Amino acid sequence: MIPVTTSGKALDAAISPDGKYIAYVLADGAQESLWMRHITTSSDVQINAPANLSYSGLTFSRSGDYLYYSSWDGITPITLYQMPVFGGTSRRIITDVDSIVTFSPDDKHFAFLRGKPSQNEASLIVANTDGTGERKLTTHHIADLFLSGPNYLGPAWSPNGELIAFGFRDSLAGAGVSKVMAVQVKDGVEKLITSHEWSVFGPICWLHDGNGLVLIAAEGDAGSNKQIWYVSHPDGRVQRITNDLNDYQSVSLSADSTVLVTLQHQRLSNIWTASIEDANSATQISSNKYDGLQGISWTPDDKIVYVSQTSGGSELWIMNADGSNQKQLTSDARVNSPPSVSADGRYVIYSSSRTDISHVWRMDINGGNELQLSRGRANWAPQCTIDQSVVYTSFGPEKRLWKVPIAGGNPVQLTDFDSTLLTISPKDGEIAYVYTSMADQERPVRKIGLIPLEGGPPTQTFELGVRLRTVKWAPQGRMLTYVESRGDVSNIWSQPIDGGPPKQLTNFKSDLIFSYDWSRDGKKLALARGSRIRDVVLIRDITNPQ
């Protein structure tokens, strides 16, 4: 691997067909800019100045004459642009593009994904390179094609022009895993490229001779590290190219497939504690580099259960509040979800993909007596309730909330509408969930809904314009707390659900917050704090991995 950038602020990258240039995106505070690197001389030229836009989907035309990219201002639909490689004005090509575009061998057409949330469907669309002549090649449920969210996945057109490969999950059959599918351009007939299954899927590229593909994917749960894989064609043999604790988030090949460019993403995190009376005086209690990234949970007797990659995989650990007596609770369980400790402190609830599909599990606080609580479809991110039950999100064609007794038994469905579990109130058991609402011009908006512990229709809905993965009830209830990041600094804020302005609870001047939890008495915070490093790297000779 050869580093291309060293700032730690790269967001996307693509290599030109001749292997001489790399286009990449840099974060510049809250803004983003576009750059072009000449590989031989290591010289960089800024081709789009910093702006309040999000860039994604960088790719070159097969001729190498044009750079294509998508941009989004946070309001209007995502728009695809074309720019001459050696400078010039960007030209708007098409709007409502939800993936990277991939070009036909003759450079006359491209294909991309477009989601229609209001219709719960997504389509693979082929169009002329000027944006005209759109036609749907295949259509599936939106959960089947958008496996990791818009602007992350990308189809890939084969060198002979006959196939377009894409990631696919058969959620109608209850599958919680993803495979590589291909559709024939001439008639829309689909076939599997390989029977191998992954939990998380990313971009795909064909090798120049059509004898294989390179892709980004992860095994295990959704929190697993995404690696670079090779799939041979047509026999579907699978081999991993990278195997480390980094995440890889893009893949782009030169025309002769001798050089690959990718975005290497590393999150460094350790656990800190802070008193809410002086939340700015945090104390670091772990120093293992990868602690708490996928979650933290306090026990009633002031211990901390957390996810760590210290042993190589994402496993559950427990330690005292001062960082002493660290003990591993799970081993080879492929655990990645946030742990949740029961109200009486007897159990730890978590999700594991040890049976290939993610399910809800329970174990004693010391790590023994593991018991599977959910079955069927993929189930994720369980949390304990005040009535000794467990609530979790079940993923199928739609996302629904279910509840199961912590002692085991038959689950009951709590919602019959789009809902993903956020947090459960430790005071009255009220459940906050996130759902997608449609605004004007089919623009999806994520909102929060509240339901009672026994389920039913929402009692209240509202917007909270932050990363909703980090939302938690305040210990006293009737108030949500959340992480808000500005640049490379995160802080905890609170928002009364009955109205009123948000209030900043911490005032950190450095580091991001990846996860956090309130102590049972509401007087302390445990926080996974650290940094995110994202750089472009170049990999040579990928077809001969050692």
Image: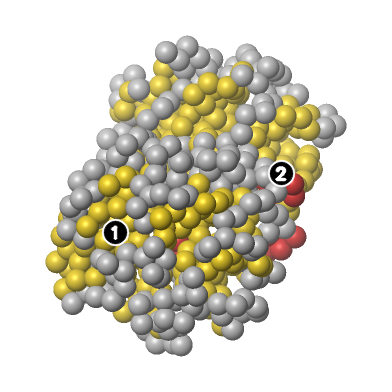
- Provide the residue designation for mark 2: 170
Q: Is residue 162 above or below residue 398?
A: above
Q: Nearer the viewer, mark 2 or mark 1?
A: 1
Mark 2 Cα-neighbour bin, 10 Å: few <14, some 14–19, many ≥20: some
- Provide the residue designation for mark 1: 304
Amino acid type at mark 2: Asp
Classify the position of the N terminus by image quarter. top left
**Would residue 113 be visible to someone looking at this image?**
no
Q: Secondary structure at mark 1?
A: strand
Amino acid type at mark 1: Ile
Q: Residue at x 35, y 35 (%)?
A: 312
Q: Is residue 426 above or below residue 149?
A: below
In this image, 29 relative to 414: left or right? Answer: left
Q: Residue at x 46, y 58 (%)?
A: 349
Which of 18/66 is in front? 18
Q: Secondary structure at mark 2?
A: loop
